[in-house]
Amino acid sequence: MPERMVDVGILGAGGLGRSMVELMQHKPHLRLAAICESAGVAICADGLELAEVIAAAERGSVATVPDAGRPSEDSIGDVIAAGEALDAIFVALPNLPNSFVPDVAARFAAGGFSGVMVDALKRTTAVELMLEQHDTLRDAGITYVTGGGATPGLLTAAAALAAQSFVEVSKVELYFGVGIANWDAYRATIREDIAHLPGFDVQRAQAMSEDEITEELNRRGGILELVDMEHADDVMLERAGICDRHSVTVGGVVDTRHPEKPVSTNVKIHGRTFEGKESHHTFTLGDETSMAANVCGPALGYMNAGLWLHDRGIFGVFTAAELMPRMQPPRPVDSGQWSVASETQARVARAF
Amino acid sequence: MPERMVDVGILGAGGLGRSMVELMQHKPHLRLAAICESAGVAICADGLELAEVIAAAERGSVATVPDAGRPSEDSIGDVIAAGEALDAIFVALPNLPNSFVPDVAARFAAGGFSGVMVDALKRTTAVELMLEQHDTLRDAGITYVTGGGATPGLLTAAAALAAQSFVEVSKVELYFGVGIANWDAYRATIREDIAHLPGFDVQRAQAMSEDEITEELNRRGGILELVDMEHADDVMLERAGICDRHSVTVGGVVDTRHPEKPVSTNVKIHGRTFEGKESHHTFTLGDETSMAANVCGPALGYMNAGLWLHDRGIFGVFTAAELMPRMQPPRPVDSGQWSVASETQARVARAF
């Protein structure tokens, strides 16, 4: 029996949300208490049966989860209403429009939620809007980690870590390869990727019909080559004091027809040491690790890090470049692993 | 003018301590207020002139720093006595005996120091002894980061980060290359490395005369091949919940006669994803980055992370695998970047 059971809610039951449910099958200390999609929700304080949630999502809607599922006209509102029972939320909602996820976070704050939230946002503008919610979420007692997926997320944190060897970071280059066997399950993600293609933008990608997207993919043989992407790694590394946002470039290749990665995903951190040497460190992901593994694993790690901070009364919005994700949820604070001497606590309290 | 000036003390003026002073020349927010070696100390609350400290150390003793330097029979005690003026301590003392650094930390706690401390300890036993000081240091209001160098440190943190993609980590392999042009400046480090050679141990290495060490190096053409090293990466990754300590191996090659690394330092993290795929991520350090850059840079990053925790009243012993180092010292808490809502603060306070 784990020392601590964490009650989790997932917003979104597309490819990302569904992968998170699958990952949770390996995490006995996590209990899925709520999951929603645009027109349906499944909620059970005692924990949903993960296999049933996956089956329902595959049938087309989590509303069909036996007993716990139902259609909903405000599924996010329904999860907020169940917020008392939730320790942490994984936000697997579409990134577009950029204000969508930040607005949802603000709704949770207004609705009285006071736990941990983690998103896997990708776009710079979305993360910037999220960072603007800092005071609102802090005052609500929410610890929010933004950009906690793969890139930004795992690779951004690797860049922030690697940067420590240098007194000046001149360039951070992220280059990813993604192979998707069943792109149908990742429609929202692919729509976002299309917005990064030369000649496309967010508005145009949003306006495309499903047929138009299929056509565009066919025209490109299923390969999307993305350059100079608006990825939040830039603002996250700038905020962490690593380098100017313009020194960060993000590009990659997405193969929507094969599960193999067309290139090895990597990040190179170029800089100058205090001795004046120019060099770079490289962090390379194993080709056999999927986008789902590299997004959902780190996101859970940041959820654990968020719980650690939350237990200690530290609230507000943090980025994945500022925190080390944790493999396990923290032990309860009263277990003796950590506590503050009372005199010091009084001193800290006076400081506010 | 930086937002915050951090007053730093350095324990040890050998190769590592001296490199840290050189690195500090690039860090305008750090002020070196004290540095000591076994029989000498230099202290100045207004900040020592870094170039003068380096020159004095190269002359043979920081006791010769103009005005601020003097011989001392208890140089560590002298730094503790000046502790009120110090925000953070970098511990660059010899690793051997294993209890040396943990005992020094306990002396700081007993002497009333209540700031941040960071070490670059290497050996498992030393870090384990350090972790045993958790309650003592927490109660003293000290935030202590242990194993905050390169390996353990930078590479351990990279392993902890990379592990997030996997549901099970089967193996972590650290392999380093070190090139030293002037091994004379790294006598203590090399003595520790010799203890890792087949047929040697800590006692034998400690008992060797300088001539015997030179002889041993000559016999090996200046090359030390180290296998199955007792490096604290194992206990740090185990404590962080990443994997069993026996799944961590550390080896490497030290060339004591050439500054070039004989192999590229890297860490490979092997694991299985939630989808059942076996793979590994790799983090590789640039060959042009020196051991000094990869130890001292991360150590300062962990000092900044320690200050961030300390500002928030979080004390005790943490390892480098649990924290993300920070490129800059945190802004003062009262700057509005972070604070706790008063109601929540009260709730947190009640929890203790």
Image (cartoon, coloured by chain):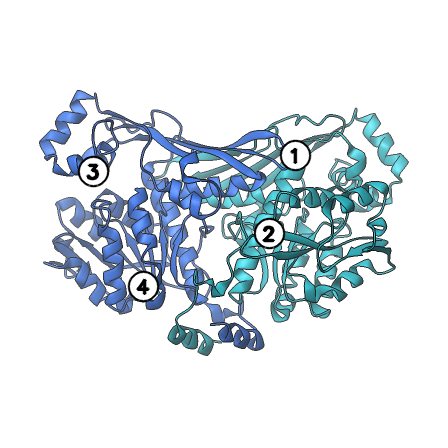
Chain colours: A blue, B cyan
The number of numbered discs placed on residues in the rendered structure image is 4
Kind of residue at badge 4: Thr
Residue assigned mark 2: B29
Kind of residue at badge 3: Val
Eyeballing the image, is A352 above or below A219?
Answer: below
Please state the horizontal and vertical placement of residue A222, each as a whole percent of the image.
Answer: 22, 24
Please state the horizontal and vertical placement of residue B188, each as a whole percent of the image.
Answer: 78, 43
Please state the horizontal and vertical placement of residue B287, each as a whole percent of the image.
Answer: 60, 28
**Residue drawn at point x = 46 percent, y = 66 percent:** A312
Q: Residue furthest front?
A: B1
Q: What's the mark number on residue A136?
A: 4
Chain identifier of the residue bearing label 3 in the image:
A
Q: Secondary structure at mark 4?
A: helix
Residue assigned mark 3: A202
**Residue drawn at point x = 57 percent, y = 38 percent:** A166
Kind of residue at badge 2: His
Q: Secondary structure at mark 2?
A: loop
Residue nearest the viewer, comparing B145 with A66: B145
Q: Earlier in the sequence, mark 1 or mark 3?
A: 3
Alpha-carbon distance for marks 3 and 4? 27 Å
Q: Tags 4 and 2 in contact by the CB under 8 Å rule?
A: no
Residue nearest the viewer, comparing B157 with A182: B157
Residue assigned mark 1: A275
Q: Are marks 1 and 4 on the same chain?
A: yes
Alpha-carbon distance for marks 4 and 2? 31 Å
